[in-house]
Amino acid sequence: MAVEFLVDEVTNNHTSVTKPMYIRETAKIGEGAFGTVSLATLKNASASKDERWFGPFAIKKVPAQTEYKSRELEILRQTSHPNVVGLKFFFNYPNNEDRGKLYQHLVMESLPCTLQNEIKRYHASKLILQESHIQVYSFQIARGMNYLHSFGICHRDIKPSNILINPETLVLKICDFGSAKQLEYNQPSVSYICSRYYRAPELIVGCQIYSTQIDIWGLGCVIGEMFMGSPVFQGQDPLLQLREISKLLGAPDKTFLFESNPNYNGPTYTHKMFTSRLSHRFSKVFVLASPTALDLLMGILVYRPQDRLKPRQIMAHEFFQPLRDPKNKVTPRTSSEPVNVQNILYNFSDYELGVLGAEASKILPLSLSE
Ligand SMILES: Nc1ncnc2c1ncn2[C@@H]1O[C@H](COP(=O)(O)OP(=O)(O)OP(=O)(O)O)[C@@H](O)[C@H]1O
């Protein structure tokens, strides 16, 4: 499908310099609700004929906003982190497939697959990811969230198809900031965001003053899904989603409902569906999870957002202890050569270390924290 075109004004996100560039799109790699994602390479328009194309990049195209600024572009411009997809260039260009309408093009670093592809790949062979891979991937999502949440940026659509991975290097990056928003303390936001299976219970009951802790619920669902091979809570409609959650956690209590939305008058599923203890139910649902993984999931999949673990508490959890030992190498599924994951997990910036605070000593590898 290779398509080549010249764009007069392409802005480099890093330098903010705008210049003409050639774009060569080679394949469509993703399809979303509003646009498409293609694989592409770029070249300076002034480059000589034999100068190389650089890339590959992933270009996301969505209709350009005319009345207000694109939040996705704004947030991607503001962020720079190893676990957040990097924006390289951006430009507006008419889309021939949509009557020449102007589309915003976000040129991002490209990764070979999504966590959803990876989970499905194992599930097709009746397997799940190795626990060490679940640790490496979950840690990086929590680290990306620790960074985003420190600016109040809430992703609002955490799910495996919005998590990019490189199975060879085990590097992970959060993508799709199309629903993201910088939340302001005590200010309302729409509650009808986030894909159904990954929606936090407070969103289901219509909470409008929510926090970045809605992303943590999504992270719990993603970790659980890596252990199960399929989504943990699969409600057939938005309210039945709460019923699925109640089957594991029990009915939401009055305090939680009142704090989330005092006007909620939907079903509360108070009919008791089990007699067993919470830890027993978790171990029955996540049969393949180790005791420390179950403990982590029980700290995340909690009704009250303020009682849910925070990203840095997640990173400090015992589940991730094996990664802190430099002798412990992780072998990717694509090779027999182990990867030194310490290089990708713990290369914290001074800013991140500041955000981690006292928790850092429980997170850093043993050699650095002693
Ligand atoms: N940087 C990237 N590298 C590789 N693949 C990507 C990249 N960004 C997006 N994709 C692929 O494109 C898909 C859709 O991207 P994205 O979620 O950003 O678009 P969307 O229009 O918001 O989609 P949706 O409506 O499903 O949320 C992703 O699931 C992934 O498969």
Image (spheres, rainbow, N blue to C red):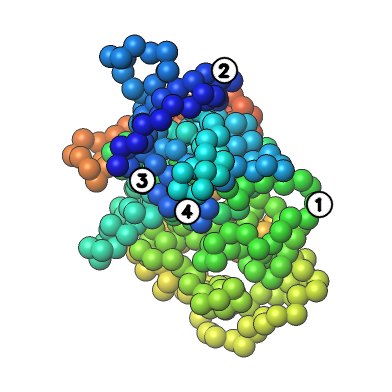
Structural crowding at the residue carrying mark 4, measured as other residues with C-alpha within 10 Å and reported as few (<14), some (14–19) or many (≥20): few
- Answer with mark 4 or mark 2, whichever residue precedes in sequence: 2
Dot 2 and dot 1 residues touching (CB under 8 Å): no
| Mark 2 C-beta to ligand 1 under 8 Å | no
Any part of residue 94 in sight: yes
Q: Which residue is mark 2?
A: 17
Number of residue marks = 4
Location of residue 98 with respect to 125 vertically, above or below = above
Q: Position of residue 43 (x, y in %)?
A: 39, 21
Is 162 or 122 nearer to us in this picture? Answer: 162
The mark closer to the camera, 1 or 3, is: 3
335 displayed left or right of 8: left
Q: Position of residue 137 (x, y in %)?
A: 41, 46
Structural crowding at the residue carrying mark 1, measured as other residues with C-alpha within 10 Å and reported as few (<14), some (14–19) or many (≥20): few
Q: Which residue is mark 1?
A: 186
Q: Which residue is mark 4?
A: 32
- Say what amino acid the circle numbered 2 marks: Val
- Say what amino acid the circle numbered 1 marks: Asn
Location of residue 266 with respect to 316 vertically, above or below = below
Q: CA distance from mark 1 to mark 3?
A: 41 Å
127 displayed left or right of 210: left
**Residue in the image at 22% along x and 63% along y:** 125
Q: CA distance from mark 2 to mark 1?
A: 37 Å
**Residue in the image at 41% along x and 37% along y:** 58
| Secondary structure of residue under mark 2 | loop
The numbered mark at residue 28 is: 3
